[in-house]
Image (cartoon, coloured by chain):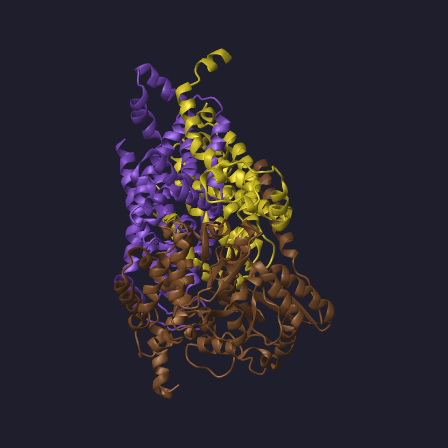
Chain colours: A brown, B yellow, C purple
């Protein structure tokens, strides 16, 4: 009997403890309009905490909460399943955005006055991501990222190497670097996603920006559009380490930081990881020159973070006020400084030094979205590129790409073709 | 007596076990060395990674503790783990007894046994979304829900363990108690529950370890509201494009200590509670 | 007579509430998940029922086939390796040795280290250290990284899986060995049974229930392998290490084919239950024989 009592005591304590835990964590701000932002970049959490604090200090009628949780994509999914939508979500401009627009989760923000200040090229990028054209705008682009080739500035100056502007010049440069006993590129293809970095930056130069949409509409095939990209990707990789699949992203960043290679084809997002190992390093970047005609080359840039108001948001006016605050020049500049990002807003912003080589493209708006933003993640295009880079069989790669594309995009293709039948194929 | 024990130490096995320890010591050495190094000391060369840190400083540990809000997260982790383990031992041993003693002769209990044990093989991914929805509907999107789910998730494995252990406990013990007029309920708590001590310790270790390291359940059930457990807080070190291994390793080493201590305590119980001792 | 009824009632009173809890949080969500497997649900938004399409697709998807082959191969080899080593380790740790507490704690460590740490260290080991050893010793086979070669990457995964799981299996074997009464050994000593014979005819029959438990847990854990894949290869090289759980998580939860991967999960569940039931019935026959 004694033992029974002991057990019920333990149970009671456990229940009590659970109840106490439940109790805390609920803080009420009665009378104010609550706005909640859920954004997917935990690395910018410190910035958003500061914004939240400043916003709440200067606004009496609205209470803002910004959460920057780890693994935000899983959290977003579970909250959508529960139909517990945040007012604003901060996401990237990729296929998930396409899905969310298609699922009517996001609200039309074309009536947002601040939209006028956003660079048209980024608004167009979002527009293009819609699976079937839909009236309205569903996200406010905040910042973009850019990918090309990072290079070791000091090493380039020391050897007098020039920034290549055409494919021929890039190949010559690689030969020259190699002849001096230095490895031109480093790669970390064991982390499959990094295979997309050289791929994307070549594909924007060599394939039409709307390749995927054209394929969906049945107008072309990847075999026709991607052959040159695949072949040049293989050429690029031949100037890397002997077995690039042996190394991971972190190995490649460390190697590049230690001066083991002159260049590293990856996005500007890798810079903090590189500087962590070698804080003194001078890194700059240039646009991957995929064409021999320099004027045809374009910067690979996409929307890295946008804010989208959800359809469930009850107070759009308040949400817009929050967006206004986030887009204030000083706040946006603070984000750019913190994350080496490219602003999506018109205006005079100071860019991080490692983007110097891309500045002219950014300023003239000569940029094209990442092709992989159209790839469904379950198709694992990164893994298919990894396979290509290992067995170097371009024909097999392209054939599989076309075959898998129709398999994984069945529903999208059907939707696009139905739409085209109804509205006529003319764009 | 002492002399006799000493004489019976099996030296060859002791030596072999110490040699085998290299498979544990080497990775652990790497973890410790990296936890003390600065990011600028990281290299891709073998000698570089195996070398001792330039300075032995606890700054990584201090910083890791700050970033994970260590004491808070530790408190949450401890509370969830301890509550789950206690509930599991009480409920699962009871269930193990009821099912284990009857499944041989009752079809019903045999089906219950197979039904629950087969729950072990349900891929968690298929349960995730429905559970996220269900717990929110039941207002269990909080610690209580997480703990409840753990009790359910580990039930199949623990049932397997308890019923397996019960096979080796002679039924004569209970019959003797029943003859003395004790009820089944009383017999369980008075006789069976204490005899199962080594299994309680085993269940405690396995359950505690699983709960201690689990990220997914609190992540989806609480969806970022509420407070972090240690593994959730440790996700801070890994972002999409960068990982600070030095801080992460320091943090993992810190998280390792409580569970190792718990294990050592439980191990003693496993050894001390030898069944044949109880039988006598 | 009253006594028997009384005890029956007690058993029922214990079983029913716990069973209800289990049904509520395991069976019901499972049924909901099974319903999703007949839809084109992405994980959010609206969805339509598509009948058996997802199931038909499964059988024509070469990636699913490849993942089954890889996962089963891994599970069989890792189960054998893990059980042999952990049984030996348990016997060793249970014998009269010096530094018992220390050794037991030390061998437990691999189980506690987080996936990030294990991933980093073993990636380092396979990328730099092992090829370094290979070069130093002039062993050609070791000079390349095991992780970049699609014919050896799975072996690396087996090594990591075994390294991490041995600890748990050892604990279960040790607790099993506690149920072997001392007098069995003493009797054995009198009969002059030693070493292998003593284990084969005296110890092993008594720990068969634990052997069964470990086999089932191993098969289950390795068939559901996910963390080690994420930490080591992310399914590569050449998609050769995509496990079933890897596809279910990555394509179903992170990607947009939740409905399809739910169908995969349902089929997978049925396969594992079938394997495990077969395994348990074989072992229980063995138990009876002995």
Residue A11 appears anywhere in the view = yes
Give the residue at x 34% y 53%: C237
Q: Nearer the viewer, residue B1 or A357?
A: A357
* Displayed quadrant of residue A332: bottom right
Q: Is residue B56 above or below residue B143?
A: above
Query: Horizontal and vertical percent for residue A391?
Result: 28, 56
Q: Nearer the viewer, residue A163 or C134?
A: A163
Find the residue positioned furthest to the front: A160
Q: Is residue A190 above or below residue A412?
A: above
Q: In which quadrant is the N terminus of chain A drawn?
A: top right
Query: Horizontal and vertical percent for residue B178?
Result: 46, 33
* Displayed quadrant of residue A176: bottom left
Q: Nearer the viewer, residue A184 or B185?
A: A184
Q: Is residue A211 above or below residue A191?
A: below
Q: In which quadrant is the C terminus of chain A drawn?
A: bottom left
Residue B106 appears anywhere in the view = no
């Amino acid at each position: 009997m004694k033992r029974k009592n002991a057990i019920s005591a333990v149970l009671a304590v456990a229940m009590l403890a659970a109840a106490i835990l439940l109790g805390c964590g609920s803080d009420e701000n009665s009378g104010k309009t609550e706005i909640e932002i859920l954004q997917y970049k935990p690395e910018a959490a410190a910035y958003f905490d500061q914004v939240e604090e400043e916003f709440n200090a200067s606004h009496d009628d609205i209470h803002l909460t910004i959460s920057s949780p780890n693994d935000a994509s899983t959290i977003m999914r579970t909250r959508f399943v529960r139909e517990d939508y945040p007012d604003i979500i901060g996401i990237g401009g990729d296929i998930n955005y396409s899905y969310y627009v298609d699922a009517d989760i996001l609200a039309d923000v074309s009536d947002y006055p601040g939209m006028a200040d956003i660079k048209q090229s980024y608004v167009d990028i979002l527009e293009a991501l819609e699976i079937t054209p839909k009236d309205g705008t569903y996200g406010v682009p905040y910042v973009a990222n850019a990918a090309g080739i990072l290079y070791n500035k000091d090493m380039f100056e020391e050897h007098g190497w020039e920034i290549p502007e055409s494919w021929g010049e890039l190949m010559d440069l690689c030969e020259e670097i190699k002849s001096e006993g230095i490895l031109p590129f480093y790669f970390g293809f064991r982390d499959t996603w990094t295979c997309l970095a050289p791929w994307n930056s070549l594909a924007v130069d060599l394939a039409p920006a709307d390749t995927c949409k054209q394929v969906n509409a049945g107008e072309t095939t990847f075999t026709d559009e991607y052959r040159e990209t695949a072949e040049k990707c293989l050429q690029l990789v031949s100037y890397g380490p002997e077995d690039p699949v042996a190394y991971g992203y972190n190995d490649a960043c460390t190697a590049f930081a230690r001066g083991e290679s002159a260049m590293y084809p990856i996005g500007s997002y890798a810079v903090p990881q590189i500087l962590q190992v070698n804080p003194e390093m001078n890194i700059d970047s240039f646009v991957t020159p995929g064409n021999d005609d320099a004027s045809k080359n374009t910067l690979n840039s996409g929307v890295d973070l946008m804010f989208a108001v959800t359809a469930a948001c009850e107070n759009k006016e308040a949400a817009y006020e929050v967006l206004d605050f986030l887009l204030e020049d000083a706040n946006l500049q603070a984000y750019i400084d913190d994350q080496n990002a490219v602003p999506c807003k018109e205006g005079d912003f100071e860019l991080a030094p490692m983007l110097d080589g891309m500045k002219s493209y950014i300023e003239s708006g000569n940029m094209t979205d990442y092709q992989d933003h159209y790839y469904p993640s379950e198709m694992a295009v990164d893994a298919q590129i990894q396979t290509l880079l290992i067995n170097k069989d371009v024909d097999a790669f392209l054939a599989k790409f076309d075959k898998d594309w129709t398999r994984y995009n069945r529903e999208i293709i059907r939707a696009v073709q139905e739409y085209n039948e109804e509205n006529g194929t003319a764009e | 007596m002492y002399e006799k024990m000493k004489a019976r130490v099996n030296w060859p096995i002791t030596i072999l076990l110490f040699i085998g320890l290299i498979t544990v010591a080497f990775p652990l050495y790497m973890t410790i060395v990296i936890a003390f190094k600065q990011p600028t000391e990281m290299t891709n060369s073998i000698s570089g990674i195996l070398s001792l840190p330039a300075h032995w400083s606890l700054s990584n540990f201090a910083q890791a503790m700050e970033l994970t809000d260590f004491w808070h997260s530790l408190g949450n982790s401890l509370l969830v783990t301890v509550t789950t383990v206690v509930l599991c031992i009480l409920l699962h041993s009871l269930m193990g007894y009821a099912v284990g003693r009857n499944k041989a002769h009752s079809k019903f209990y045999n089906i219950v046994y197979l039904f629950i044990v087969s729950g072990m093989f349900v891929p968690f991914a298929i349960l995730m979304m429905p559970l996220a929805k269900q717990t929110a509907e039941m207002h269990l999107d909080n610690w209580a829900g997480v703990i409840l789910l753990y009790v359910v998730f580990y039930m199949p494995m623990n049932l397997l363990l308890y019923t397996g252990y019960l096979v080796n406990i002679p039924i004569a013990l209970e019959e003797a108690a029943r003859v003395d007029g004790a009820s089944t309920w009383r017999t369980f708590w008075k006789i069976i529950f204490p005899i199962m001590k080594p299994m309680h310790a085993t269940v405690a270790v396995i359950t505690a370890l699983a709960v201690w390291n689990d990220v997914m359940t609190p992540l989806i059930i609480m969806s970022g509201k509420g407070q972090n457990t240690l593994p959730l807080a440790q996700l801070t070190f890994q972002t999409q494009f960068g990982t600070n291994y030095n801080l992460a390793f320091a943090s993992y080493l810190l998280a390792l200590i409580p569970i190792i201590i718990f294990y050592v305590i439980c191990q003693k119980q496993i050894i001390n509670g030898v069944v044949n001792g109880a039988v006598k | 007579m009253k006594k028997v009824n009384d005890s029956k009632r007690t058993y029922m009173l214990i079983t029913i509430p716990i069973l209800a809890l289990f049904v509520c949080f395991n069976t019901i969500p499972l049924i909901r998940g099974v319903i999703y497997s007949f839809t084109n649900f992405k994980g959010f938004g609206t969805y339509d029922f598509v009948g058996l399409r997802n199931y038909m697709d499964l059988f024509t998807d070469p990636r699913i086939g490849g993942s089954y082959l890889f996962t089963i191969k891994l599970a069989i080899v890792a189960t054998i390796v893990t059980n042999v080593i952990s049984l030996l380790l348990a016997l060793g740790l249970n014998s009269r040795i010096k530094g018992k507490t220390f050794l037991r704690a030390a061998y437990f460590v691999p189980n506690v280290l987080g996936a990030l740490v294990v991933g980093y260290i073993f990636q380092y080991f396979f990328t730099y250290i092992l090829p370094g050893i290979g070069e130093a010793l002039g062993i050609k086979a070791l000079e390349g990284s095991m992780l970049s070669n699609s014919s050896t990457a799975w072996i690396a995964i087996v090594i990591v899986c075994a390294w991490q799981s041995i600890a748990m299996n050892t604990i279960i074997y040790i607790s099993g060995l506690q149920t072997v009464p001392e007098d069995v050994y003493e009797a054995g000593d009198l009969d002059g049974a030693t070493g292998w014979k003593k284990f084969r005819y005296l110890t092993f029959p008594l720990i068969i229930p634990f052997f069964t438990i470990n086999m089932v847990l191993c098969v289950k854990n390795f068939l559901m392998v996910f963390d080690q894949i994420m930490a080591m290869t992310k399914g590569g090289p050449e998609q050769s290490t995509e496990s079933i759980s890897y596809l279910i998580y990555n394509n179903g939860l992170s990607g947009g084919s939740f409905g399809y991967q739910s169908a995969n999960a349902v089929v997978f569940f049925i396969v594992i239950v079938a394997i495990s039931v077969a395994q348990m019935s074989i072992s229980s026959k063995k138990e009876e024989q002995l």
